[in-house]
Amino acid sequence: MTTAEFIARLEPHADEPLIFSAAGARVPGGYHVTEFKATSVSAIDCGGRAAEWQELVLQVLPPAADEAGAPMSVGKFLSIYRRVANALPVAEGALVRIEYGAAGERAVSYPVEAISTGAGGVIVELAAPTVACKANDHTVGNVPTVAADAALVGGSRAQALQATGCCAPAVSGSTSSAWPCPVLADQSLALTGGGREGWVHVSWS
């Protein structure tokens, strides 16, 4: 879900409680929104396609044992977002992720799967992140689709398509190699480039 879609879905419900549900378990009321992080990602998949996209990562901190209470209202969350958007360049097309870990557990960066409304308030459903062969499936893990004519690195588009866009080390009948899968080639490469993060401190307490 993009930032523009996320905010548009929340705006009609300013007076409602904002509830996060991470992989089926609700975040306890009294949580804190501790950080907004705008990142740009540069990546290359195992089919050789280069891609770039932006993300808006919100960090949600569970309450301490003595802080449990009502969830933040949608209106309060939107006021926080607007302060951040005035101080930090946030792209409307940036994909939204919620970074959250229950008390005593490691944090996970969840894609937003859906937003629903009910008697309890507005529920933001967070999907468990997944991994996939990005050359074959550019949608898994909330990564945007890469156009078929996107720039290739180390090979031609035809080679990548003939190799099923995936982890084939070479194209049959071809004299040149398609982009090799680092696993098959036994190379220790980090294919997804790091985010270029913009940091601005904004107080919303």
Image (cartoon, rainbow, N blue to C red):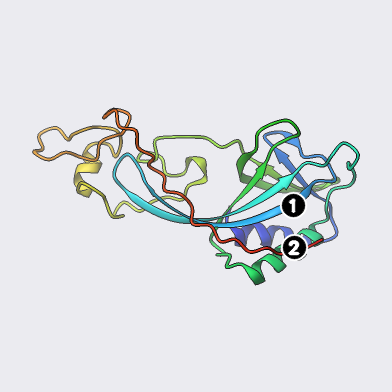
Amino acid type of disc 2?
Ile
Name the element at disc 2: helix
The C terminus is located in which quarter?
bottom right
Residue at image coords 73%, 30%: 104
Q: Please provide percent x and percent y for residue 109.
A: 60, 42
Amino acid type of disc 1?
Val
**Label 2 Cα crowd, 10 Å radius (few <14 / some 14-19 / many 20+):** some
Q: Please provide percent x and percent y for residue 103.
A: 76, 34
Residue at image coords 41%, 55%: 52
Horizontally, residue 139 falls left or right of residue 84, namely left
Horizontally, residue 197 falls left or right of residue 164, namely right
Q: Is residue 185 above or below residue 123?
A: above
Q: Which mark is residue 10?
A: none
Image quadrant where residue 75 sits: bottom right
* Residue at image mark 1: 33
**Label 1 Cα crowd, 10 Å radius (few <14 / some 14-19 / many 20+):** some
Residue at image coords 21%, 39%: 162
Name the element at disc 1: strand
Of the two numbered discs 2 and 1 on the same chain, state the one appearing first in sequence.
1
Residue at image coords 22%, 32%: 169
Horizontally, residue 8 falls left or right of residue 161, namely right
* Residue at image mark 2: 80
Could you give the CA–CA distance between mark 2 and mark 1, rounded to whole angstroms?
A: 9 Å
Q: Are marks 2 and 1 in contact (CB under 8 Å)?
A: yes
Horizontally, residue 81 falls left or right of residue 52, namely right
